[in-house]
Amino acid sequence: MLTIDGVTLSSPLLLGTGKFASSEQLMAAVQASGTELVTLAMKRLDFAGPTDDILTPLQQLGVRLLPNTSGAKTAREAIFAAELAREALGTHWLKLEIHPDPRYLLPDPIETLSAAAELVKLGFVVLPYCPADPVLCKRLEDVGCAAVMPLGAPIGSNQGLQTLPMLEIIIEQAGVPVIIDAGLGAPSHACQALELGASAVLVNTAIASASEPVAMASAFRLACQAGMAARQGGLAGPSIEANASSPLTAFLETL
Amino acid sequence: MLTIDGVTLSSPLLLGTGKFASSEQLMAAVQASGTELVTLAMKRLDFAGPTDDILTPLQQLGVRLLPNTSGAKTAREAIFAAELAREALGTHWLKLEIHPDPRYLLPDPIETLSAAAELVKLGFVVLPYCPADPVLCKRLEDVGCAAVMPLGAPIGSNQGLQTLPMLEIIIEQAGVPVIIDAGLGAPSHACQALELGASAVLVNTAIASASEPVAMASAFRLACQAGMAARQGGLAGPSIEANASSPLTAFLETL
Amino acid sequence: MLTIDGVTLSSPLLLGTGKFASSEQLMAAVQASGTELVTLAMKRLDFAGPTDDILTPLQQLGVRLLPNTSGAKTAREAIFAAELAREALGTHWLKLEIHPDPRYLLPDPIETLSAAAELVKLGFVVLPYCPADPVLCKRLEDVGCAAVMPLGAPIGSNQGLQTLPMLEIIIEQAGVPVIIDAGLGAPSHACQALELGASAVLVNTAIASASEPVAMASAFRLACQAGMAARQGGLAGPSIEANASSPLTAFLETL
Amino acid sequence: MLTIDGVTLSSPLLLGTGKFASSEQLMAAVQASGTELVTLAMKRLDFAGPTDDILTPLQQLGVRLLPNTSGAKTAREAIFAAELAREALGTHWLKLEIHPDPRYLLPDPIETLSAAAELVKLGFVVLPYCPADPVLCKRLEDVGCAAVMPLGAPIGSNQGLQTLPMLEIIIEQAGVPVIIDAGLGAPSHACQALELGASAVLVNTAIASASEPVAMASAFRLACQAGMAARQGGLAGPSIEANASSPLTAFLETL
């Protein structure tokens, strides 16, 4: 179970709200996914009028909002965006994203740690998007982050858990929830992340860019349930040699 | 949807019946898995008395039986076991397994093709366990097999889709259902197999050897549903570059 | 050291002769590669005249010829090609290739085993190109093949050791040399194959299609030497935990 | 060619000096490896007497010394160790290592960047060991590091290029040499790193822990030469479909 800031979420699936064809499609995907927490960039908010208004329907669906600072290139920009988001949305939860690099959108470890420490002091519940770097993740935890969000692969790449060996160490060492973010391109990737011991996953592109986003949202919901059930079931782990499940048929031995 | 011999099964999960701690545990796992088709070795059948009787309860659950020839080392032994199974169980469906090698239990391509051709002539509906060999799979299809069951990894190894590149070619070329058998060690592996386009998966060790087999059976059921839903949703596939799902926050650009 | 038919070759690199831009380029690549055994398809032989004559210069370089039956779709075709090759080239060494599939050029296990048994009886030294199927490889050995040549990945795909788990079993079980054939796309792939315990590798596309084939031939020669030296050195194998090579600096402990 | 601080090294192999059984073995491995640059922790230096003196023989071999700050847990400790090393060894080249974590010895991105900036100002030529984090690598370059040394896998793990997708981005973006450090467990790993475009590799455990360290040093030398030759040769890259190197034998088409 994923617990953040004392709030327990029954779904381990966080959904990003970018790239959907319409508000209607987004809302249908939110419902099909079973998510209880959605991220949204400030740009998605229509402060001026009714065009592309996703805020009201999201709130009507009862999901929590996790504003993100996507587009921020420095700690200063991220803190500014965070303050705006808190004021506009009435939540102090924040997904911290700082990526100076326009091509791969990879997170900046230095600015992210600096901004996280400052935002925690400012009263935010901070969930930082970060490299799959075990030492950095511990430091983010030490400055008071409510969770860490290491990347599986570059955003939107759909490549899955390309940083697997580092994710395993991060999960082993973490004292806060580990939410695998970015790069999850198929339900099997989300399932694998939860099997490994991640507390949650964040998905956006793989659902929004699917030919049928609502069906794909449902697929991710099921895959997350599978991953959580697998942890309850206790995976046996790989072995080197074959291991017959159908033992040698006795009567054949007498042939 | 998996269709064999004109029968459509709504669950893509086939369950092996070996290694369970008790009949009760097996039956609970069968129900939790949602399977409609279970394999069993002839040795599992208690012809003499009530000890370890799994046949009656399985039949009461309404699942179809798929006897296998596990333990057969030659085509002759497999055909003999098949005839016995048909008589004992009243079904002409057969999972053909011929593995001369006692260590890795890998299937013999030559004996398997030979036995398959003969068994088809004898009226069996043949589902052969086979190497992940695209040419052999086409030949098994050509002699009339109702499906092909290429291995993902050595039986009981829990290693997942170690033969992935060959499985992709097999699925692309197949005119009959492809059922990935052996080596699937986690729900994410089953999900991945169905995402790739396999028609079904067969699981035994990963469920029976889990610390909580019933919970694990449920996890595999959900993972299979996820994999099927993912196909309906249309996976977008991996890409090389990052692809922002949260576009550049407009107001930040003016900072 | 690779020993075939009582002949010991000091180079573990076999070179295919297709796809080179010219005879001159091929000869330069042969020399740079250090190979002592080259394969060639019958079509490469110019029985009629001087055009594209590679036979004479290859013989002048002192390398052994290994004619192959590429293009054969059945055992019958392969045996016919083998007889022609023996007569034309004066060698009873033969690389047996039977691939009915025009797209992936994957070997046919049934026809290959059948042809191999027949060719051995006809006095050929048979090196069969085959699937990475451990049971088939043992059967090919049992009918008298002088080596087995399991594929690493589809011919010309440059994907490397995609069939790794099966190759490891084949090498562990083999009583004859294992020569990894097809799909080796980089010198590191050849090096890895030899580190694993393969006796040799066969490369063609990766060298012939390189922008500088002669430099690439030299790279493969070095990589093969590296792989052989690594076996002499005794690889330590992977471990789970980190293991400091530079122990804790003593004076820092007193800071 | 690897150029650092205006000095061009013809060997792309850096060798660590820990874990060798004796000074004699180390010296023989240095020679067999062809390295021109060796790292050593301060603890390896015997300031007091002749026991375990590796400094004099290394200097006699003519290799450059690259002292490292292994054991430092903070920037302060690393800078202190660097000053000591410069004074003791008479070189301002420095491998910066800061790893607070005693289990996996993973580098600390924050302290490493901070120390690197300070050390550059102090006149050192800084080669920082760092996470495979593309943004951090650019920042290390921006503060004046002479190279970056991202890890392939945890130190001593012999697991190879586990951080491959991030290494590819680092290499693509780097304006200074990229030296892959840590985790290279086999010559094929070193070859692969150079094929990818790394400027050099650092190896210690895989050589020092081999059953025959001198033979293994030679294997790595050859593998590095192979990797460099492969870059000159121009790798063709993988493709999806098979691609016959032996075209269809003409006479078979008429059968």
Image (cartoon, coloured by chain):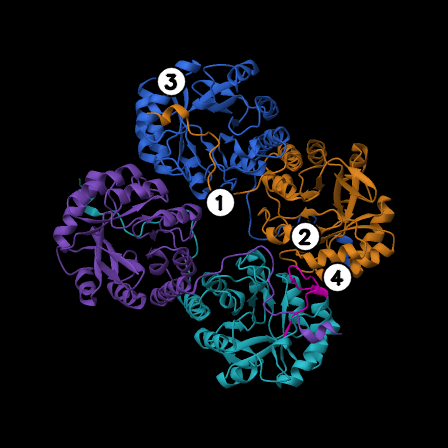
Chain colours: A orange, B blue, C purple, D cyan
Mark 1–mark 4 Cα distance, whole angstroms, equals: 44 Å
Query: Which chain letter matches label 4?
Result: A
Res A137 seen here: yes
Q: Is residue D251 above or below residue B12?
A: below
Residue D140, image x, y percentages? 66, 69
Q: Which mark is residue A240?
A: 1
Would you say residue D97 sits in the magenta stretch?
yes
User: Residue B75 has which mark?
Assistant: none
Marks 2 & 1, CB-CB < 8 Å contact:
no
Residue assigned mark 3: B84
Q: Helix or strand or loop: what does disc 1 sit on?
A: loop
Whether residue B255 is visible, yes or no, is no
Within 10 Å of the Cα at label 2, are there few (<14), some (14-19), or many (20+) other Cα atoms?
Answer: many
Chain of the residue under the numbered disc 2 shown in the image: A
Labels 3, 2: one chain: no
Which segment is the magenta one? Answer: D95-110
Closer mark to the observer between disc 4 and disc 3: 3
Are marks 4 and 3 in one subunit?
no
Does the magenta-highlighted stretch encompass residue A146? Answer: no
Quarter assignment of residue B130: top left
Nearer the camera: disc 3 or disc 2: 3
Kindly check if marks 1 and 4 are in contact, taking CB atoms under 8 A apart as contact. no
Q: Earlier in the sequence, mark 1 or mark 4?
A: 4
The vertical placement of B52 against D246, above or below, is: above
- Residue receiving disc 2: A170
Secondary structure at badge 3 equals helix
Q: Earlier in the sequence, mark 2 or mark 1?
A: 2
